[in-house]
Every structure is written in C-alpha cells, then in structure tokens.
Image (cartoon, rainbow, N blue to C red):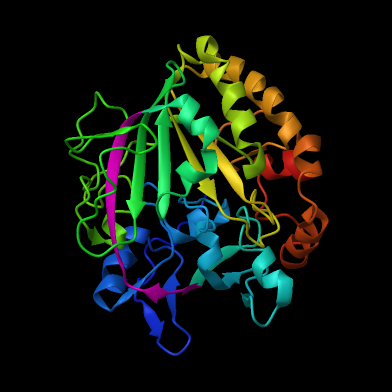
C-alpha cells in the first residue's frame, strides 16, 4: 500500500532569524515556491519539473543541476516523521550530527515524513539561454568549463551526431543576459525550444535570456503545465565528475544501440553532499539521464551495456529510475549503508515501511 500526505496543511512557517522554512511533507515545489518568492526568499535549486513533492524528491536524492549545487535534499536542515510505532521524531543536522544529514535520502524507509525544514536564500532572478549544436570535440576539450558556464547547465543529446543537440544555460542575473552569439561553438536559439526540438516549447520555461523569478527558470517546464502521466521509462546514471569525458565517450560509442530506444539524454552536474544514501555522497558528479521510448524489452537490453561500460568509473543509478545493477554492486558503493540500516531498524525494527525494492537491494 501507499500513504499520501498530500492533503496536509501546506502552510509555510518562515523563521527569518535562521533563514529556514518549515513545510508539510506533502507540499510540492510548485505549491511553496511562489509564496517563498513573494516573501523574499528562494531555494538553492529545483528539479526539471516543479510538480514533484518535496518529501518525494529528497527521498531519492533527486537533483537539479550546477557544479556548486547539491541535490534538493541539501537544503533540508530538519526532518520530522512518524515511525512504525506511531511515535513522532524530529532529526536535525544541528542537533543530531551526521544522523540528521544521513537519513535525508531515506528511500521511504524511516516512516511517514510529516514536515521538513528547508534552508532558504534571498530571492533571486534567473535568465536562461539555449544554444544549439555544440561540437562534441569542444565539449570534450572543455567539459567542466561548459558545465560551469551558468548557475545551472543542462546538455541535451541523442548521441547520434558530432554535436550536442542543445545546451541550456541558466544564469543568476538581474535583467536580460547576453552570453553572446557563441557558447563553445554552439549558436543561440532564436526562439524558445523544447529539449526535443520537434516538440512545441509552449510548456517550457521562458528562454532567450529573459530574466524571471528563480522558480520560473530553474525548472525546464512551467508550473501551470500538467506533467506527463508517469508511464515513461527513464534511467539516470551518475559518475564522478573526474570521469565525465570517458563516460561521455563510452555512451557515444553506443549510438547504434541507443538509436531505436532513446528519445533524449540530459547531462547535468551535481555537487557533493553529506547524505549517506545519496549517489553524490562526498563526490562531485555528472548525471547521464535517459528518457526512453516505450519499449521495455529494448531498454532492458541496452541497460546492462551502459552499466557495464560505466562500472569502472563507480557508476551509481538514480534510486527512482530503471536500472539492473546487481544488489551486491550497489551495496559496495555506499560506505555508510550499515549505518543507514541501523537507523532504519531503530525506527522500523520489523520492516513495516520497507518494500520489495529495498529488501532486494539491502536485505
């Protein structure tokens, strides 16, 4: 079964002294962002879609992008939950040392998350500009420079050509920005575009260097757009930033295998964090995200090829997306797994909140 806290009161309690906001765990980013902005505040980062719940995003270390931006859970300073015995707990980074940070990526195992406290920043403006046809050779020669060219940078590619299809550069600026008419050899789009160029951009956030509120530029898609149905097949793999070029070159070598099943791939950077079960624990990382065609059989054929090729670089999968890496390999990548399991067993000794996925991976 599933438990939803979506009907909880979504009031935001802001503590101006500590620059934090305490929210109901069922709130979505879309629900809280406009109010935060109106009251003069912002979050450090957002994912591509603003429709996801805050508690759901942090459970799997979901992320936005940016070489200095940690995953969305990096903003969590305290987490409140009801354990398997119905007892209410609150763990904070300040008062509970590494446990407070360690269980933020909780994989749904702690209990029912009820409230979260998020660190805030003063509100800011962001402008985004999209560039087309980045030569792959220029990317490989300047990988981290390309990824560092804005507050948040995303590459979109299908790996079929010697160019990267699109570069989305989101800059933290006041007023319109002018990155120029060239971004490492990529040329600016002359209209708003969708990550898949053939699709209408009507649901995408504003581009062409026009500044707007942080919450209306950091996501790729607009808040008033109804997102996809959830039937999509997606995978995402993370490698240490130092291996980004080798990983890109390997994935590009699979263009023939990818062509029938890949819709688009997004490449992003994520800064290291301190969460035990985060794929980015003490490791600056590059994400390779894959949006697949509705062909599960075809996807399951290509996944092992990708995973095996990236294994020498310590590849980790996104917890909430499709992967087939063996449990023993997953376990070997998380040095704090035993501490996480001890914490889970303290609050849920009988595994009431564990599911088949978690039991298969860790038990």
Q: Residue 284: percent from the left, percent from the top?
A: 62, 51
Which of these two is toward me, 15 or 111? 15
Q: Is residue 190 left or right of residue 147?
A: left
Which of these two is toward me, 85 or 295? 295
Q: Is residue 273 above or below residue 85?
A: above
Q: Report whether residue 52 is seen.
A: yes
Residue 312: within the magenta? Answer: no
Residue 202: quarter of image: top left
Q: Residue 230: percent from the left, percent from the top?
A: 40, 36
Stretch in magenta: 117-133
Residue 130: within the magenta? Answer: yes
Residue 221: quarter of image: top left
Q: Is residue 262 above or below residue 223?
A: above
Residue drawn at point x = 42 percent, y = 73 percent: 23
Residue drawn at point x = 38 percent, y = 63 percent: 27
Q: Report whether residue 323 is seen.
A: no
């Amino acid at each position: 079964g599933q438990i939803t806290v979506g009907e909880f009161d979504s009031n935001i309690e802001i503590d101006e002294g500590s620059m934090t906001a305490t929210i109901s765990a069922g709130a979505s980013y879309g629900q809280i962002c406009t109010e935060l902005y109106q009251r003069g505040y912002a979050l450090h980062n957002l994912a591509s879609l603003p429709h996801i719940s805050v508690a759901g995003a942090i459970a799997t270390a979901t992320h936005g992008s940016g070489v200095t931006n940690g995953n969305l859970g990096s903003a969590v300073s305290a987490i409140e939950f009801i354990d398997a015995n119905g007892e209410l707990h609150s763990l904070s980074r300040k008062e509970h040392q590494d446990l407070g940070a360690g269980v933020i990526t909780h994989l749904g195992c702690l209990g029912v998350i009820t409230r979260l406290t998020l660190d805030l920043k003063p509100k800011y403006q962001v402008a985004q500009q999209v560039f087309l046809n980045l030569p792959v050779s220029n990317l490989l020669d300047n990988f981290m420079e390309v990824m560092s060219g804005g507050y948040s940078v995303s590459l979109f590619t299908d790996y079929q050509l010697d160019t990267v299809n699109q570069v989305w550069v989101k800059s933290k600026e006041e007023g319109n920005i002018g990155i120029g008419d060239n971004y490492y050899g990529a040329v600016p789009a002359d209209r708003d575009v969708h990550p898949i160029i053939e699709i209408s951009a009507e649901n995408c956030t504003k581009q062409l260097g026009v500044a707007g509120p942080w919450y209306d530029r950091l996501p790729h898609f607009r808040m008033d757009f109804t997102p996809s149905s959830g039937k999509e097949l997606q995978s995402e793999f993370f490698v240490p930033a130092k291996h980004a070029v080798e990983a890109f070159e390997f994935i590009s070598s699979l263009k023939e295998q990818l062509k029938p099943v890949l819709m688009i791939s997004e490449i992003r950077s994520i800064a290291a964090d301190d969460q035990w079960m985060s794929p980015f624990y003490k490791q600056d990382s590059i994400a390779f995200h894959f949006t697949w065609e509705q062909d599960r059989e075809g996807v399951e054929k290509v996944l092992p090829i990708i995973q095996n090729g990236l294994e020498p670089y310590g590849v980790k999968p996104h917890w909430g997306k499709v992967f087939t890496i063996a449990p023993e390999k997953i376990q070997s990548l998380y040095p704090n797994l035993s501490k996480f399991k001890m914490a889970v067993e303290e609050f849920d000794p009988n595994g009431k909140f564990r599911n088949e996925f978690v039991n298969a991976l860790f038990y």
